[in-house]
Image: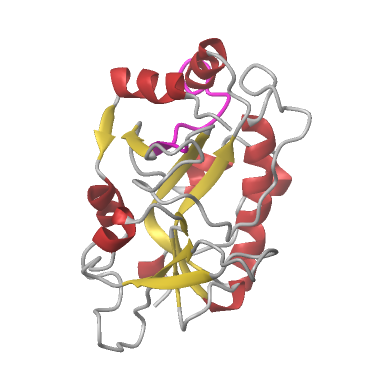
Amino acid sequence: MQDRLFIRDWLHTYFDEVEPWDFYRAIFPAGELEEKGQQVQGKYNAIAVELLPARPDQQHRAPARRCFLHDGLESLDELLESDNFIILSPISYAGKSRSSQNARYIYALAIDLDGITDLGKLQNLFHQMEEEVRFIPKPTYIVWSGTGVHLYYHFVKPLPCYKNTVMQLAALKTDLTKKIWNGLVSELAEKPQIESLFQGFRLVGGVTKGGNRTKAYEIGGKVEIEYLNEFVPDKHRMKEYAYKSDAK
């Protein structure tokens, strides 16, 4: 599948590009993750997954390599040099697995959007974010993934992954996804991709399907849950939650 370069070029014309290291430093501020080689109670790591080229005897599934992102982001340069498909969620985990049971803090809500087939649909996306329209919430960052975009709503403070918080946030994400995947923005509006809250997203600066590199652009400021709640029906609004500093 060919990359839709017009999306990248339009974003690059109107918004400031954020370098990969700066993007992940913003998502995971200094002092937030666990330092490499140290185990500190209450601090955890982000986990990237790299799909390695399959060997001839591995026809059905390519091998994967986990890479831990510590507080110094030491492994990020190595990941950015890779030509393999890599995913990284804006979430911290305890242990070595990206399972939902191991998730500890959610730093941003990320939503995948495909089906932007022409400039008009891309412009409609931004029109629906405008203050006088307010049909969909304005994200902190938009990442060009190659064939589409990822909308990152960076929280003012991370949300702890309590069971009730995860359930509410998943419902909120589902409603927002359906709203964002509307017919004026996506040709795939009839079949929006409803993904898990813990879905991995293409590494910013990583390889696209077309062989280019994903790009991040700063669109707005950090968001609070109260802001996102304004765009969904009352039954899907988050009503019981606490940010990290309030949950200690």
Is 69 above or below relative to 199?
Answer: below
Looking at the picture, tell me which residue is in the foreground, 227 or 38. Answer: 38
- Does 51 lie within the magenta span? no
Find residue 192 and report its horizontal and vertical position in percent. 71, 36
Residue 86 picture quarter: bottom left
Q: Residue furthest right?
A: 190
| Residue drawn at 41 percent across, 44 percent down | 223
- Tell me what residue is drawn at x 49 percent, y 14 percent: 123
Q: Position of residue 125 (x, y in %)?
A: 53, 21
Look at the image and name its color scheme: secondary structure
Q: The N terminus is located in which quarter?
A: top right
Residue 32, compared with residue 3, is above or below; it is below
| Residue 85 vs residue 91, the one in the foreground | 85
Give the position of the C terminus as an image quadrant.
bottom left
The outermost residue toward the front is: 56
Residue range of the region highlighted in magenta in the rendering: 128-145
Observer able to see residue 72: yes
Q: Residue at x 31, y 18 (%)?
A: 14
Nearest the viewer among 154 and 118 is 118
Does residue 140 appear anywhere in the picture? Answer: no
The prevailing secondary structure element of the residues shown in magenta is loop
Q: Report the front residue among 74 and 91.
A: 74
Return the x and y of residue 80 as percentages of the image width and height. Answer: 31, 54
**For the point 34% across and 46% down, which residue is it?**
205
- For residue 72, which quarter of the picture? bottom left
